[in-house]
Image (cartoon, rainbow, N blue to C red):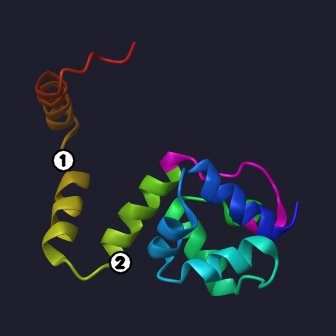
């Protein structure tokens, strides 16, 4: 499968029209049509944008190496890294304070959140 076909697979598997997919990437629908048909090959920047925007594995999009989607855990870790690398000092301070909480506080926080969210404890 070509990279062009993999781009189409991403779009279709996520249920996007070419127009909606194009809007997420800030390109024209005709640009998406050309990418999917092989009329244009994606730039490295476009490949990385598709991966970042839709949670697609770079290795899959570029080379066809499974899995197609990046596991949610990695996406979440990436979000934390983005926060810590970002400019919002307040949010960074919250993460630092959370990281320094004593273990017994985590147990209390877990209990309160599970009750508030109606979640059962993992077994």
For image coordinates 68% across by 75% down, the residue present is 33
For image coordinates 58% across by 70% down, the residue present is 50
Please give the residue where the numbered disc 1 appears in the rendered image.
101
Seen in the image, is 55 located left or right of residue 100?
right
Does 113 appear above or below 8? above
For image coordinates 32% across by 71% down, the residue present is 84
For image coordinates 18% across by 21% down, the residue present is 118
Seen in the image, is 116 located left or right of residue 49?
left
Q: Nearer the viewer, mark 2 or mark 1?
A: 2
Q: Which picture quadrant has residue 61? A: bottom right
Please give the residue where the numbered disc 2 appears in the rendered image.
85
Q: Nearer the viewer, residue 46 or 27?
A: 27
Seen in the image, is 93 located left or right of residue 33?
left
SS class, disc 1: loop
- Magenta segment includes 65: yes
Question: What span is colored magenta in the figure?
Answer: 61-73
Whether label 2 touches label 1, CB < 8 Å: no
Q: Which picture quadrant has residue 60? A: bottom right
Q: Position of residue 1 (x, y in %)?
A: 88, 60
Seen in the image, is 106 located left or right of residue 75?
left
Tally of numbered tags: 2
SS class, disc 2: helix
Q: Position of residue 66 (x, y in %)?
A: 78, 50
Binning the other alpha carbons within 10 Å of mark 1 as few (below 14), some (14 to 19) or many (20 upward) gives few
Q: Position of residue 119 (x, y in %)?
A: 24, 21
Q: Position of residue 112 (x, y in %)?
A: 11, 28
Instruction: Determine which of the numbered discs, if any, sits on residue 72 in the image.
Output: none
Spot the residue most to the top.
123
Does 74 appear above or below 103? below
- Magenta segment includes 69: yes
Binning the other alpha carbons within 10 Å of mark 2 as few (below 14), some (14 to 19) or many (20 upward) gives few
Q: Main secondary structure of the magenta part?
A: loop
């Amino acid at each position: 499968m070509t990279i062009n076909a993999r781009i189409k697979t991403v779009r279709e598997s996520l249920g996007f029209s070419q127009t909606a997919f194009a809007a997420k990437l800030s390109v024209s629908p005709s640009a998406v049509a050309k990418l999917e048909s092989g009329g244009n090959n994606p730039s490295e920047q476009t490949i990385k944008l598709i991966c970042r925007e839709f949670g697609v594995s770079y290795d899959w999009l570029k080379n066809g190496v499974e899995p197609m989607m990046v596991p949610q855990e990695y996406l979440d870790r990436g979000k934390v890294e983005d926060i810590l690398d970002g400019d919002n000092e307040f949010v960074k301070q919250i993460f630092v304070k959370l990281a320094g909480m004593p273990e017994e506080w985590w147990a209390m926080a877990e209990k309160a959140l599970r009750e508030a969210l109606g979640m059962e404890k993992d077994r």
